[in-house]
Amino acid sequence: MRLFQWLKARFRSIRYAWQGWMRFFHAEPNTWIHLIATISVFFLAVGFNVSATEWILLLMAIALVWIAEMFNSAIEVIVDWISSEWHEKAQYIKDVSAGAVLVAAAFALITGLVVFIPYFIS
């Protein structure tokens, strides 16, 4: 009986996580930019037949951007929920959170360039 309850709780957690992903995807306009970039990288990687190591690097960079964007969105919602009025510290929190996404995106871009430039040159 405990195993059944444990499994039921795990499936419920997965369902909540999926709902969170879908809510994030529908609420944030930047998700479409990330999705287009993700699909583009996938097709380039398949087209160039990149190595397993290069796949791992690309997938890690993609995941980092998605994770950063999701945390940024959650942080912005929390800050807006706490207070609808502008506050210097709230703006700082939002700016730093957005900056984390920028760092992740820059890392992903550099990773993509390091992986794909040799294929474009040859």
Image (cartoon, grey):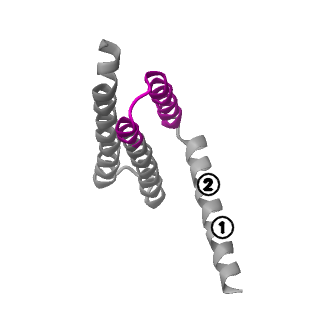
Where disc 2 sits, the SS reads: helix
Nearer-the-camera pick, 20 or 28 = 20
Residue drawn 32% across the image and 30% down it: 109
Residue 13 screen position, x and y as percent: 60, 66
Q: What residue type is labelled 1?
A: Arg
51 to 24, vertically: above or below: above
Q: Is residue 73 magenta?
A: no
Label for residue 18?
2
Q: How crowded is mark 1: few (under 14 residues within 10 Å), some or many (20 or more)?
A: few
Taking 92 as reference, is 18 left or right?
right
* Residue at the outermost top position: 121
- Which residues lie in the magenta part? 30-59
Q: Earlier in the sequence, mark 1 or mark 2?
A: 1
Where disc 1 sits, the SS reads: helix
Which residue is disc 1 drawn over? 12
Q: Distance between the residues labelled 1 and 2?
A: 10 Å
Residue drawn 57% across the image and 42% down it: 25
Taking 47 as reference, is 26 left or right?
right
Which image quadrant for residue 82?
bottom left
* Residue at the outermost bottom position: 1
Q: Is residue 51 magenta?
A: yes
Taking 22 as reference, is 28 left or right?
left
Residue 4 screen position, x and y as percent: 70, 79
Nearer-the-camera pick, 56 or 16 = 56
- Per the picture, the main secondary structure of the magenta-coloured stretch is helix
Label for residue 118?
none
Quarter of the image where the C terminus is located: top left
65 to 82, vertically: above or below: above
Q: Which amino acid does label 2 sit on?
A: Trp
